[in-house]
Structure formats: structure tokens, C-alpha cells
Amino acid sequence: MKPEDAWGARWVNCAHPLSHEFMRVASSKESLVVLAADLPTIDGILQLIEDVGDYVCALKTHVDMVEGFSIEDWSRVVESARSKDLMLFEDRKFADIGRVAQTQMGGLYDIRSWADLVTSHSVSGPDVVDGIAAAWDDVERVGGVLLLAQMSSSGNLLGEAYTDSTLVIGKGSPHVLGYIGNGSSVSELVALRSKVGEGKMIWTPGVNLDVKEGVLGQRYGHPAEAVRAGSDAIIVGSGIHRAEDARTAAREYASSSWGALLER
Ligand code: BMP
């Protein structure tokens, strides 16, 4: 299906080039799934990409959970993801002053050299986004930032006033491709979408086909409900990598999310 037909107003109004890249990949795979590859080894991540790469659009990582990390070994993950047409998304949740964020994009993990997208908190103000963007400029790459406007964890401190201030930062920056929203709450997502409008994406963790399964304060909602409420990408970790058959699970998340997009 052509992305402009599947995405409608979102395709027309989202200005960031990487939002179009995501919508293109999603339409070619008929999936809104972002894979949260929360595994501690590079071999484990490579195997997961091999198993489910056909059904997911982006690989979301936490590089600092990878044991014995080296950038040489990591390049195997980057190559494998690219070969499966996956965007690379480091869920770093930056939260410092701009200059430090710029430096943190380099260093051991050299996130700026391989990530297309990163997450950032907005708690330190708008300069964190400029610091991240400056790091991509340093290596002549284009990247996009997703600001945490809501969270899925129970008891989090991102109340409505915080969300509203985050949206002001996001609206003011061409580098902000969209927001992280709370996939476990339809009402929070509907409210977020009505404030965001059509010009930015909302990506949602906290989704699982078995909504009872959260541990350590994680809350879950159904992926199709999240998409109908205005989410553009469902971030799925345990629902896939802890499934008995990860490939079948990924296919189910793909079809649930894509079907919901076509309904809305
Ligand atoms: P799982 O589907 O296994 O619950 O994983 C969710 C993923 O989304 C994790 O990688 C986590 O870091 C991330 N995440 C989240 O769960 N809630 C948020 O509010 C923000 C996140 O980035």
C-alpha cells in the first residue's frame, strides 16, 4: 500500500524527513511495530533481528545494557538492521544540558554515528534537543528526537502540565519528530493526540497483546487500541522477545497495529 494512502493527514503534515522514512517502512511491511530489543548480548540481538526483522520497522536499543560493548561488534547489529530495512533508534533518554548531551552522543557508544532516532526527556529545557542535533551535525548525519511527553510506568511524574510544556519544546524544534506517549492509557493518548495535532508522531511503549503482563510497574494496553487512539508506532519488547515463538508474535503485533491504522 502507498504510504500516503495509509497515513493520510499524518503523511501530509509531518515535516521531519525521518517520519516519512518510518511511514514508508511501515507501509512496505504493513506493521507499526518498533522492536524493543532489550537483550544483554549482541548475538541475542542479531538472532532477534534475524527472526522478526521482516515484521518490524525499527530496532529500539538500550546500548548501555549490552555486556562487553564494543563499537566494532555493534557494527554487526547496525549492518543487520539496515539489511532488514530497520531504522535504528537508541532509547537513551537524554536529560542533561545541551553541551553534555552533544558529548554523550559520541563517546564509547558513538550513538550519533549510527542512530537515526533517540529519545530525550525535556526536564532540562529545549537546549538538550539542540545539543543532540549538533552531535548529528558533527558527523553530517540527520537524526530525529522523540521527547517523552508521557510514560507508561506507574507513578511517573509526567503530569499534564509537564506534558504541555514538553509539547511547547517540541513544536519549537524542527529536530523533534514526535513524542513518546503512554500506550497503556487510551484516554491519555486521545488527549495527547488532540494537543499534538497531525504534525508530529506519537510512539507508544506499554503495549502488549496480553494486557495483564506488566512487571515492576510497567502498565500495558492493547496495541490496536493505542493506534486507534492516535499512536503511530507501537514499541514492543517482552511481547516479542519473551514469546515462545518471537516470529509469530511479531507477525501478530504487526497485523494488529496495521489493521488499526487502516481503521482510523
Ligand atoms: P516491554 O514491552 O518489554 O515492556 O518494553 C518496553 C520498552 O519501552 C522498554 O525498552 C522501555 O525502556 C521503553 N519504555 C517504556 O516501557 N515506557 C516508557 O514510558 C518509555 C520507554 O522508553
Image (cartoon, rainbow, N blue to C red):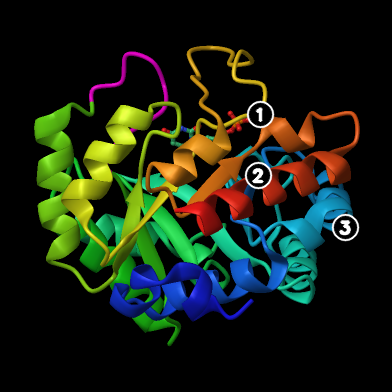
What span is in magenta? Answer: 149-157
Q: Secondary structure at mark 1?
A: loop
Is the CB of the residue bearing disc 1 within 8 angstroms of ligand 1?
no
* Residue 21, disc: none
Horizontal side, residue 168 vs residue 210: left or right: left
At label 3, the amino acid type is: Glu
Q: Nearer the viewer, residue 176 or 14?
A: 14
Q: Between disc 3 and disc 1, whose residue precedes?
A: 3
Examine the rendering and report whether any part of residue 96 can be seen: no
Residue 180 % position (x, y): 37, 45
| Disc 1: which residue | 209
Q: Are marks 1 and 2 in contact (CB under 8 Å)?
A: yes
At label 1, the amino acid type is: Leu
Q: Could you tell me what secondary structure mostly forms the magenta stretch?
A: loop
| Disc 2: which residue | 256
Q: Nearer the viewer, residue 3 or 135?
A: 3
Residue 89 % position (x, y): 54, 58
Rendered view: 111 above or below 185: below
Q: Residue at x 23, y 74 (%)?
A: 174
Q: Nearer the viewer, residue 19 or 95?
A: 19
Q: Residue at x 64, y 62 (%)?
A: 57
Q: Between disc 2 and disc 3, whose residue precedes?
A: 3
Q: Assess whether residue 222 is covered by the magenta stretch.
A: no
Q: Secondary structure at mark 3?
A: helix
User: Crowdedness of circle 2 by 10 Å Cα count: few (<14), some, many (20+)?
Assistant: many
Residue 62 % position (x, y): 58, 44
At label 2, the amino acid type is: Ser
| Disc 3: which residue | 50
